[in-house]
Image (cartoon, rainbow, N blue to C red):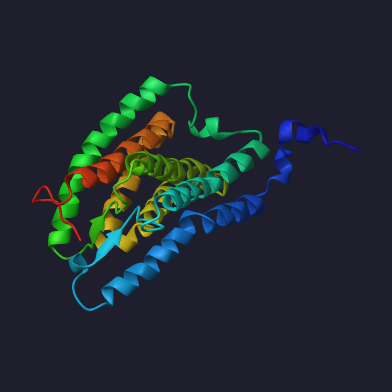
Amino acid sequence: MRVDAGSVDGALPSERLTRRIFRDETLLVLGVSLGASGVSALISFVGSVTKPGGLKDQAATLNASAAPGRPWLDLAWQLFGIATALVPVALVAHFLLREGAGLRTLGFDRTKPWSDLGRGAAVAAVIGSTGIAFYLAVRALGFNLTVVPEALPDVWWKYPVLILSAIQNAVLEEVIVVGYLLRRLGQLGWSPGTALMATSVLRGSYHLYQGIGGFVGNLVMGVVFVWLYRRWGRVGPLVVAHTLLDVGAFVGYALLAGKVEWLPTA
């Protein structure tokens, strides 16, 4: 069997990685991940705005029970959902390895753990505080549904699953929407400004199920994250920041819902 010298270590010759291949694989990655989520969120949003009553009187529930009253089966479904949601990230890693790169090219590795942690924590602190205020304001104005970050049963695995869910969200979104998509759009000849807006609108789109506030708030977050990625050259800090934001939302809601007056509940 003849082996192409340019295919050593799994990398295809650069001349065989055409723009068409990059375009098609990008559409496929988005089609099985966050692009599909964006379409789903749009359909959900249309359903919400056409339903009698205001948006704030409706609820968008995250991390809901998959098998009420059957905790072990529920746990199995929760772990299954988290694991399968990360398959597109593995697909991205495969595509990058094929061209002789890898996730390290995106800055998703363990080479700078303390730097990533420090930067991510700082970003989370700033965005978290402003994000809560923004959510409460847009909901009060009727532009957002009431977001219920978790509705899991009160069992021993509740908080570990919420933390794993936060990590999964962060890895999926930052690796694909920031690192991978910006790389591919650049290879397809998109300008930096156009790529920034495209990825930011995508981030906003799959949060549209929360309402207009969810779309706008995440679009702005997308702009900030792209700017930081281009400044630091790493998605690591963004994964840390996103994880901390979601852990704060999921676990914080579980601990505070019904105990403080300022936190809306369904």
Name above or below for residue 167 compared with residue 20. Answer: above
Say if residue 211 shows up in the picture.
Answer: no
Residue 225 vs residue 135, the one in the foreground:
135
Residue at x 18%, y 65% (from the top left corner): 56
Number of marks present in the image shown = 0
Q: Quadrant of residue 1?
A: top right
Confirm whether residue 223 shows in the render: yes
Q: Residue at x 24, y 40 (%)?
A: 127
Task: Give x and y (percent) for residue 65.
Answer: 36, 56
- Dividing the picture into quadrants, the one containing residue 137 is bottom left
Q: Could you say where residue 153 lies in the image, as x and y percent from the top left?
A: 31, 51
> In percent of the image, x 32 and y 40: which residue is there?
159
When the figure is inspected, residue 57 is found, relative to residue 93, above or below; the finding is below
Q: In this view, does 251 lie above or below 232?
A: below
Which quadrant, please, contains the C terminus?
A: bottom left
Please state the horizontal and vertical placement of residue 133, each as a whole percent of the image. 15, 48
Residue 54 location, quadrant:
bottom left
- In the visual, does 59 lie left or right of 222? left
Which residue of the protein is positioned furthest toward the right in this rendering? 1
Residue 23 rendering spot, x and y as whole percentages? 60, 54
Camera-side residue of 119 and 245: 245
